[in-house]
Image: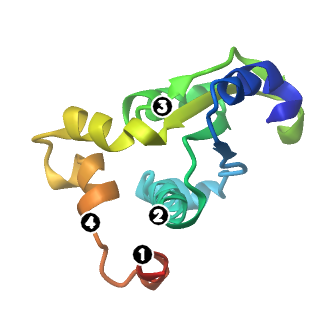
Amino acid sequence: MDSEYLEELDSLRGLGRFIGEAGCLAANPAYWKSGHVLLLYTIKIVHIFNEKHLNLDDLVITVNPKHVWFYEHIMLMQRIGREKPYKDVKGAPAIAMRLDIRTMKETYGRTYQGHPPLSNMYDFFFNSAPEGSSCLNRLELQ
């Protein structure tokens, strides 16, 4: 991300923020038939690993503009950069976004309070322990 969004990332670093990039979250379109489940579990694994080992302030990503709505309205991420061609994905358009991990629990709690279980991102990230997910359980135990 530094190659395309150095100024934006350096402004976070200048505030003393410890940032981590979650990159290359692309998947074969066949995996998307079940919605965003694969993506959500990937982000949850990153979140658990961060809590136990990394202690990041922000998770940063680049997304194709056609997916920005999901990241802004469901994942509650903020844009930190304008749309640019991104070399790492053959020049496809990308927008830089960040998730403030330090305020994530509070923000998700406020936003998703009262939502039913299947659409409650607070419960998914902070209260759920999915059965049969040995990878997630192993990360939580370490």
* Of the image marks 3 and 2, the number of the one nearer the N terminus: 2
Q: Secondary structure at mark 1?
A: helix
Question: Mark 3 against mark 2, which lies toward the viewer?
Answer: 2
Picture residue at 66% right of the left edge, 58% below the top: 28
Q: Secondary structure at mark 3?
A: loop
- Would residue 66 be visible to someone looking at this image? yes
Snapshot quadrant of residue 107: top left
The residue identified by callout 4 is 128
- Neighbourhood count class around disc 4 (C-alpha, 10 Å): few under 14, some 14–19, many 20 upward: few
Q: CA distance from mark 4 to mark 1?
A: 11 Å
**Rendering coords of residue 35 (x, y %):** 42, 52
Q: Secondary structure at mark 2?
A: helix
The residue identified by callout 3 is 77
The residue identified by callout 2 is 48
Q: CA distance from mark 4 to mark 3?
A: 21 Å
* Residue situated in front as seen by the camera: 56 or 4: 56
